[in-house]
Image: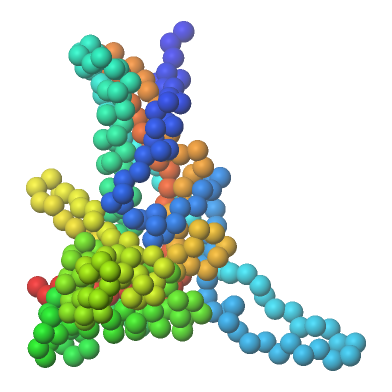
Amino acid sequence: MSTTLNQERMVDPVLTQFAFGYKNQSMIAEILLPRVDVDSEKGLYPKFGKESFQIYHSIRGLTAESPFIEIGSSTDDYILHEHSLNAAIDDREYQESNWPIGVEQKKLNALLGNLAVEKEYSVASSVNTATNYGASNQKILDGTAGKKYWSVYSGADKGDPIGDINTAKERIRTMTGQYPNIMELSAIAFAVLKEHPDITDRIKYSQVGIVTVELLAALFDIPKIVIGRSIYSDGTTFYDLWEDNAILAVAETGIEVPCFGHVLNRRGYPRVTKYRLETRKSNVVNSSELYSHVICSWDSAYIIKDVKSP
């Protein structure tokens, strides 16, 4: 009896374990929006508002009933989408290799890299869009008063990164009751910021003497700063995924904790399968992920766009 392709596909435990251990240090999507594993491809996730900060009249008189309040958050729907890529390994590639599993891992590594860039692109495209934020949770620099480019280091048009970042911190606090615990700097923004005289003047007497991520975190009193170094290509040109922006946010690992958002991942993924494709005299390695990213509160983040002058 013939078997179907799905029956022929077998989950490869060795390669799947390799996929679980895969890390690309340049990818920050799951740091800004921490990953949460879920057990269903469809479901509800919490969206947070201002309910936790409301003052209620809680005084109770003798024999009176205590007032009731609504506890919890509103919810929205999520749907996970499968992202899957194949790579064929020709029989002759196995013959030329002294370590067959190494050939498969090399192909799998390429698949994982492509899938990671796609995930990074999906998250970056969403959180880099200023119109997704409230009008008071964004600042688009254009060289005008109060919106000077960080890349201008002197004169009347000198940028004010310290002032801009402090404004962002206070805005998040007034909207959520929390200061941001993470700041994403694109590679361009980091390069501009670490040469700014307002920054270098404050750290010139430090033991290191150069601007590091750790020194910036201490300077701005933000527990974690990550640099978005990822790039992508449209086939001809390379682009910075994180553009020339800075994003401050409240990032939390728990799904029920008010925060910016999450990458929701189907438990048990990524998953790696192998099958035989005789018409190509090849084994095929397939890597699949099942995820979606969700924003729980745009109030929990602030974007500073276009920090480098054109």
Where residue 202 appears, as percent x and y from the top left, is 26, 79
Residue 26 visible in this rendered orientation of the protein: yes
Here the colouring is rainbow
Q: Is residue 303 left or right of residue 143?
A: right
Q: Residue at x 54, y 59 (%)?
A: 254
Q: Residue at x 42, y 18 (%)?
A: 8
Residue 289 lies in quadrant? top left
Which residue is more in the foreground, 206 or 173?
A: 206
Residue 246 lies in quadrant? bottom left
Q: Residue at x 23, y 56 (%)?
A: 229
Which residue is more in the foreground, 1 or 225?
A: 225
Residue 75 visible in this rendered orientation of the protein: no
- Outermost residue, right direction? 63
224 up-or-down from 114: above or below: below
280 up-or-down from 80: above or below: above
Quadrant (top left, top right, bottom left, bottom right) of the C terminus: bottom left
Q: Residue at x 49, y 76 (%)?
A: 178
Q: Is residue 296 left or right of residue 285?
A: right
- Outermost residue, top direction? 1
